[in-house]
Image: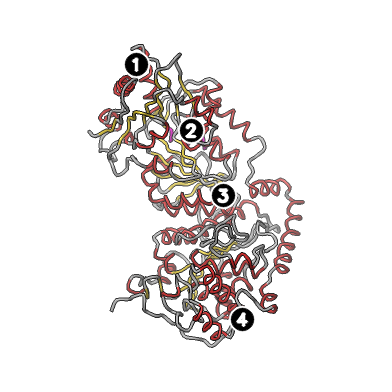
Amino acid sequence: MASSSTDRVLRPDNGQRNELANALRALAMDAVQQANSGHPGAPMGMAEMAVALWTRHLRHNPADPQWWDRDRFVLSNGHASMLLYALLHLTGYDLPIEQLQRFRQRGSLTPGHPEVDHTPGVETTTGPLGQGLTNAVGMALAEKLLADEFNRPGHTVVDHRTWVFLGDGCLMEGISQEAISLAGVWKLAKLTALYDDNGISIDGAVPSWFADDTAGRFAACGWNVVGPVDGHDVAALDEALREARASSDRPTLVICRTTIGKGSPARAGTAKSHGEPLGKEEIAATRAALGWPAAPFEVPADIAAAWNARAAGADAQGAWRAGWEAYRSAFPAEAAELERRMSGQLPRDFEGDLQGWIAEAQLKADTVASRKASQKSIARLAPALPELLGGSADLTGSNLTDWPGCGAVRGGESGGRHINYGVREFGMAAIMNGIALHGGFIPFGGTFMTFSDYSRNAIRMAALMNRRVIHVLTHDSIGLGEDGPTHQPVEHAASLRLIPNLDVWRPCDEAETLVAWGSAVTQPRRPSALLLSRQNLPAQTRTPEQTAAIWRGGYVLSDRPQPRAAILATGSEVGLAMAAQALLDARGLPVRVVSMPSTSVFDRQERAWRDAVLPRDLPSVAVEAGVSKLWASYGCTAVLGIDRYGESAPGPELMKAFGFTPEHLAELVAGEVGSEPQIERSSN
């Protein structure tokens, strides 16, 4: 018989009663009930798991949530947010009970899913399942790489662990396989995942749709697997975590058999406890069953005192600080560098060097593909920014994300700065988020632009979390050629530009590419996507003022006295626009060429700048080898774009076939001056 939402999965009751765990249960069910919204079941089921970890193993200081060497805790099954909020409140973070009482309310510190930089002690924003686990892999990798780089014999200043709670949903998402596979080959021994194996998801008992051999799956990926253990036995959980800590060359999965909604007489073990309040009557019955007499949102003083971690946290950080001062005395240069990198600040003279490199690139005027210009930019940046950590999803030779002397990141080795992620675009993007969340690195990773679809939710999460992550997306149009429509982006640039807080750059030559990179690394609270060509692009001539204007995202590249129209172009089509301008000159029709490498950045400029670049009374024609609809918002009354999928043929042949020629663009502009609005859509 098929499973349904009425199925019940109850683990054997061990007869134990843990008051610290019951405090978590009570706060979770009270907050969800008051909000009339939320997920009480998972917090109630994972309560003993939290007691074992947070009172016996987690090294943290509630008084200083940003202490560098704290352990990281990730709640991958972020719908169980009330578990985390209760833990943060009880252990002494700046999260008063009034905030728990305002769970899921506008303006509170307790949103429906945990949000980093919003609630003290929250390490990452979770909710999209599987990504929290993958963020944790990135955090553990960052710890390992920093430890390899900065620790010295007798001076261990980077030495912390990453702990992650996850559920069935996290393991059902495909990204989990990408994450656990990489964690295994990287030998991330300080990573421990605790699996809340309760056998229930929203649709009911999971065996009908999730019958994986989870232990075998992790073991096959090089993990140490502990359990199954009784997830409601604190002593058994403590022993399992000790075993995890003893692992020296493998990450550990602890399988914790739990009952969702533990303690609720009618809802325990059911999908009904997953995503809705228990109800006042059932909460009263649960309190009675747990022997919990306290009123809603009240925790007895002795239990609150047992939870409070401020004294232990101060001791742990104090011991670390003593070691840090000894390290600073013995290795002052290394200490200063680690401090700089963990603060997210760039080297003092970096921006001056960057301006020099841009001027040099403008002077040399090389004709190269923007993907190659990107690689040249990386080769300049990487020696000046040791925090730059690159990689590619099995396309290094095509994305050109490596550089001389970068070295490869390998499990059991040290010194590499370039990661082979394998064919794992989504995993790469979410791991980079974890690396950025940890601190000490600026991660970037490459894939073909069309495969940004695989990564999209993790790109969105970087934007939501305000993290400096750089996506190198090459082969940015039908110009890539013979690989055909499966690999040729059409809608992708426009789609990426829709993501709030993501800077999207599509540079036209080496100078614009270097500015795009400069913007990406100097934006501490914003991710970037660099859209780069496979084909060579001509260098454009600029004055120093025009070169400086690239930073504004859109600027006048070439002007004429009293222009009759403007051509707005991006990336590989800027050269096309310049050629069309020359043809129109010969016909006595003066036009302005505007290069728009980043609509995201241009949109942030003051109105005066935007109106000066694109005057409202000047007819504008846009050209980009992508979907056309975006450009109406910039006042363009005609667009040379592509609103269909491409074909398999050499790139130059495709560009001509789809109308991306100087002659066709010049005719479109000439016809537009004084004509009705039109959209030139390729439909060959």
10 Å neighbourhood of mark 2: few (<14), some, or many (≥20)?
many
Quick check: marks 3 and 4 in contact, CB under 8 Å?
A: no
Mark nearer the viewer, 1 or 2: 1
10 Å neighbourhood of mark 1: few (<14), some, or many (≥20)?
some
Which residue corresponds to mark 1? 583
Which residue corresponds to mark 3? 415
Q: In the picture, residue 585 is in which quadrant?
A: top left
CA distance for labels 1 and 3: 53 Å
Q: Residue at x 43, y 61 (%)?
A: 176
Q: In the picture, residue 21 is in which quadrant?
A: bottom right
10 Å neighbourhood of mark 3: few (<14), some, or many (≥20)?
some
CA distance for labels 3 and 4: 47 Å
x, y percentage for residue 340?
Answer: 67, 46
- Residue 461 is left or right of residue 308, and the answer is left
Check disc 2 and report its element: helix, strand or loop: helix
Comparing 661 with 397, the one in front is: 661
Q: In the picture, residue 1 is in which quadrant?
A: bottom left
Comparing 452 with 636, the one in front is: 636
Q: Give the magenta part as a residue range.
A: 370-378
